[in-house]
Amino acid sequence: MTEHIDRVRTYALVFAVLIALTVLTTAVAFVDLGPFSVVVALAIAVGKMLLVALFFMHIRHSTRLTRLVVLGGLLWLIILILLSLTDFATRTWVGVPGR
Amino acid sequence: MITAAVQEREHYLNASYGIKSWLLTKDHKRIGLLYLATITFFFFLGGAFATLIRVELLTPQGDLVSSETYNKLFTMHGVAMVFFFLIPAIPATLGNFFLPMMIGARDLAFPRINLLSWYLLVLGGLLSLYAMLAGGVDTGWTFYTPYSTSYSNTWVIATALGIFVAGFSSILTGLNFIVTVHRMRAPGMTWFRLPLFVWSTYATSVIQVLGTPVLAVTIILLFCERVFHLGIFDPTRGGDPVLFQHLFWFYSHPAVYIMVLPAMGVISELVSVYSRKPVFGYHFVAFASVAIAVLGFLVWGHHLFVSTQSLYAGLVFSFLSYFVAIPSAIKVFNWTATLYKGSISYATPMLYAFGFIGLFTIGGLTGLFVAALGFDVHVTDTYFVVAHFHYIMVGGTIMAYLGGLHYWWPKMTGRMYPEGWAKLSALVIFLGFNLTFFPQFVLGYLGMPRRYHVYPPEFQVLHVLSTAGASVLAVGYVIPMIYFIWSLRYGKVAGANPWNATGLEWQTASPPPAHNFDQSPVVTHEAYDYSTVLGEVEVG
Ligand SMILES: [Cu+2]
């Protein structure tokens, strides 16, 4: 297996983008977007996560098995969120007796 | 004389000497023994807490310890047993020692990380031990909020950090095993020639890697709320206390399979070797391990049926919980089918295997009881639940752990244990176990709540029975401790393959050389092909 290594410039660029996104997250926190502030913050976080995984963790150039491991981790995160939401999203559907 | 004969040949135990050669070892076999010593310590520590609990429960009054002390006792019993004994028990000791040998490898893929993971367990154990000595913790091993974040004034953070550190030990072991199984198999050792212990340990490793980080996150969040007062679980600050239970059980339900899947792997080995037959339906048993690992992540909400979880979520989790019964039943039926027309020998490890099959079946079936929404409302937080999970963890995991320890003891030490004493203690453990925990099913059904030390007098008879059983059980656990140590010096010298087993670990000397095999093995047969080994097993 040949190891593909990005140039230093690429890493520096990714690092700069990550810092910029961090600044953006902080800046957005001062603007009142209502419920959308969470959406925006999470969207930026997902972008940063992808940058780290694809460039710094070399997922872009890794084997299919390594990608499968990464996808497995993501899938399990989805399970955690989705099945937790079956509770949080439906909790008010039935009233509590006596209340 | 006998001692001299064993020590002539160089093996992993006499390859080097001195404390340093153990504390800095990269040999998976030595690290397995380090784990063995560590978890044995925590087993007897947890057992000591259990003893105090059972003695207190002899009488309906709280006369031995105060309520506060009692709360600490059951908490520390749970913490010591779950995180520092049961979770590392089979994977980190037997798995560490035998997984590489069973696939024909010289070591794990990352020997240094393997040593690191032992140090992490010790560090975590010392942190939790410090918390216990400094004053203890009283939240229950589940650390439910808001009690653990706002009200308990005991050593919550130190204990939780100990578990946090030990969690990384578990993750690294899992990672190491996964890579080892993928990359280090001997020539000819295809996936479907792997011994079933390897399959189940592999599935366990997947759970360890995917589940344990969530435990770490949960502990960090607990830390943030308790120390920095962030509103994560506290509703007055915008949090949700049930979120803690979701996160905690997302790890802790699968953690049950971290404890019991390797146990099932041991049973597959034992049932096969002592009935001289390949495991019935090999592929089904292998995939059942994977199925349990995956399904185990979809059912955690059955711990939240009475925690104001949405009724709809409860329905989903209850429904999904039943699916776990399918792969579990496949295993039990296939072990039983393996026995059919087998040439069965009643050696000690096989007695443990029989014990496991019976007790795991009771534990599993009562698991279906408590997975049913309506019934669970009746028995939540009663001794019924206590009995149920002890049938899985003690009747299942510890029986298999002891069975595996007896089975592989000759390979690990080069010595046989005394068969008569071993059979006796297996019997004592089985009887003591049932006497301890069966009355607890009845107690719980009648309404005895868990975690109380003062109870109505009508429950006393059942509690006395349970305590009597616990005393018998304790004797059963001490006997092997004594004869295992005795056997190191006085035990009959074991040959390379005393059971005429087929696994690669038996095709090298006992104890194995430092690099496991003098020549790298080449695999040409399916697993459990008894036509490749001759002779019958002789049992004293
Ligand atoms: Cu569960």
Image: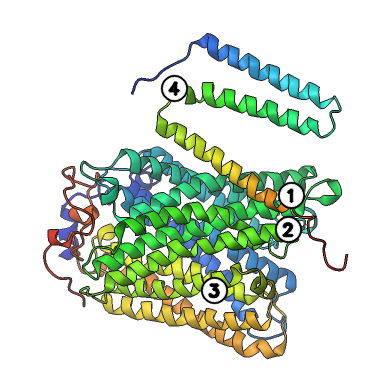
Residue in view at x 45 percent, y 73 percent: B361
Q: Chain of mark 4?
A: A
Q: Chain of mark 3?
A: B
Q: Which residue is mark 4?
A: A61
Disc number placed over residue B474 in the picture, else none? none
The alpha-carbon separation of the residues under discs 2 and 3 comes to 24 Å
**Considering the numbered disc 1 on the image, is that residue within a helix, a strand or a loop?**
loop
Does B273 sit above or below residue B246? below
The alpha-carbon separation of the residues under discs 1 and 4 comes to 39 Å
Q: Amino acid at mark 3?
A: Thr
Residue in view at x 37 percent, y 77 percent: B426
Q: Residue furthest top?
A: A9
CB-based contact (under 8 Å), mark 2 and mark 1: yes
CB-based contact (under 8 Å), mark 1 and mark 3: no
Q: Which residue is mark 2?
A: B310
**Considering the numbered disc 3 on the image, is that residue within a helix, a strand or a loop?**
helix
Q: Amino acid at mark 4?
A: His
Q: Position of residue B208 (x, y in %)?
A: 49, 48
Same chain assignment for discs 2 and 4: no
Residue A1 located left or right of residue B460: left
Does B347 sit above or below residue B239? below
Q: Chain of mark 1?
A: A
The residue mark sitting in front, 2 or 4, is 2
Q: Position of residue A39 (x, y in %)?
A: 74, 32
**Residue B512 appearing in the image:** yes
Picture quadrant where residue B131 is located:
bottom right
Same chain assignment for discs 2 and 3: yes
Which image quadrant: the N terminus of chain B?
Answer: bottom left
**Considering the numbered disc 4 on the image, is that residue within a helix, a strand or a loop?**
helix
Q: Which residue is mark 1?
A: A89
